[in-house]
Amino acid sequence: MKIISFLFLLTVTAFSQHAEKKVFPDAKESDPELLRWMNGFPPAEEKTVRFSDGTFFMFPQLRWTVANFRQLMPTVRVSRGLEAPIPLPRKERSDIDDIEFTPIGSDQPMTWAASLMKNYTDGILVLHKGNIVYERYFGALKEDEVHAAMSVTKSFVGTLAAMLVFEGKLDTSKMVVDYIPELKESAYADASVRQVMDMTTGLKFSEDYSDPKAEIWAFGTAGNPLPKPKDYKGPRSYYEYLQTVQKQGEHGTGFGYKTVNTEVLGWIVARASGLSVPNLLSQRIWRRLGMEQSAYFTVDGIGTAFAGGGLNAGLRDMARFGEMMRNNGRFGEQQIIPQAAVQDIRSGGDKLKFNKSGINLSGWSYRNMWWITNNEHGAFTARGVHGQTIYIDPMAEMVIVRFASHPIAKNAAFDAYSLPAYHSLAKYLMQN
């Protein structure tokens, strides 16, 4: 195999092989502190994790990598600015670990504490009425460090786009090529901005990690910042790859989760605002929320941020963002995101179109790169592979942020004991 070092190929290779075996060391056995990855100067060869050979995204090395991406690959900063952080008030509780819930498909109860180990949790924080009531760190993640957000990144990009829409700087009824004429020969030639934002485009783009011919491999090759082989003739950046995406089916007929849609939206956001996604996120959100740490994005070979999954941030800073969204775009005395933009997200998307996707989330929908549960609490969530989550329950006045490094990428592998835990905690906090 000529190229074994690009991000998505390695993700596909490593995790498709492990998923087939379905045998993993548990959270305690795979603890990166216990296994001592990258300890020493230099570390022992058998404890070395590299980007170039693919070990960085294999399991259990992944459990170290998710808190150390910047050590291995190029990134661009999302600056928090120079102002002092805005503290989050604390009213910590000792009763949450013992809360019980019943996982989907099971008749045996599980405790909240047990679910954290089941999910290979690296860090988790719960806000209730704006107060930190629960905060825990495991493995390689420490409170003053950042963690990969994976596809939770998409919801940040979707929020930036929604903000621009309600500020009159972006028109969802316009075609993608009105903003990005470079895509006139691609599948996006006749797609609208709204169809991209809600992922209802008809694209020939597979994210089936077990299929060696899936388009996600070519996308990963293009975005890989390492040098390409001399005989490589394909695209060399995310923007170049997007121009090659072909159409399959009709736009607007059904939901289809495709990472390239967020890459296109990131490009649109940059054109409409005149700022890169990291700079826009810094100026409009990160600096204004009083974040504790600057965040960063992984980038391709020309420094373009990976809009579909490259954000890395601190746990408490993710919670600040979630709290702002819970409060309809307001944080403290500032209206940071237009209230109408947040309400548009919370209103959800087309359930019928979502159902056509075959995703096993009955009653859910998708809007502006956010997942909408449509449950009785009006909960909505940002989701990323391997267990990354911002879960917002407006009725319970609760925000949960979780970072994790589950050996299986897909949320379907752990939704059965994550989603019931969140909803049970919400009901518990409302009653106690």
Image: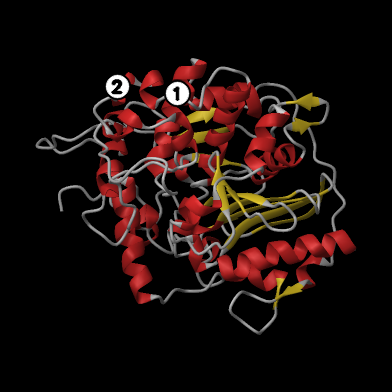
Quadrant of the image containing the C terminus? bottom right
- The residue identified by callout 1 is 174
Does residue 343 appear left or right of residue 265 in this picture?
A: right
Q: Secondary structure at mark 2?
A: helix
Looking at the picture, the colour scheme in use is secondary structure
Q: Nearer the viewer, mark 2 or mark 1?
A: 1
> Which residue is at the front of the view, 87 or 363?
363
Does residue 408 appear left or right of residue 135 in this picture?
A: left
Residue 70 location, x and y as percent? 46, 39
- The residue identified by callout 2 is 182
Q: How many marks?
A: 2
Which mark is first along the chain, 1 or 2? 1
Residue 334 location, x and y as percent? 78, 25
Image height check: is 284 above or below 37?
above
Q: Amino acid at mark 1?
A: Lys
Q: Amino acid at mark 2?
A: Glu
Residue depicted at x 58% and y 79%:
105
Image height check: is 93 above or below 110?
above
Residue 184 location, x and y as percent? 28, 24
The 10 Å Cα crowd at callout 2, few under 14, some 14 to 19, many 20 or more, is some
Image height check: is 119 above or below 202?
below
Q: Quadrant of residue 48?
A: bottom left
Res. 290 visible in picture: no
Q: Residue furthest right?
A: 432
Residue depicted at x 36% and y 69%:
18
How far apart marks 2 and 1 lie (CA) works out to 15 Å
> Which residue is at the front of the view, 42 or 372?
372
Q: Residue furthest bottom?
A: 107
> Which residue is at the front of the view, 242 or 195?
195
Residue 127 location, x and y as percent? 78, 50
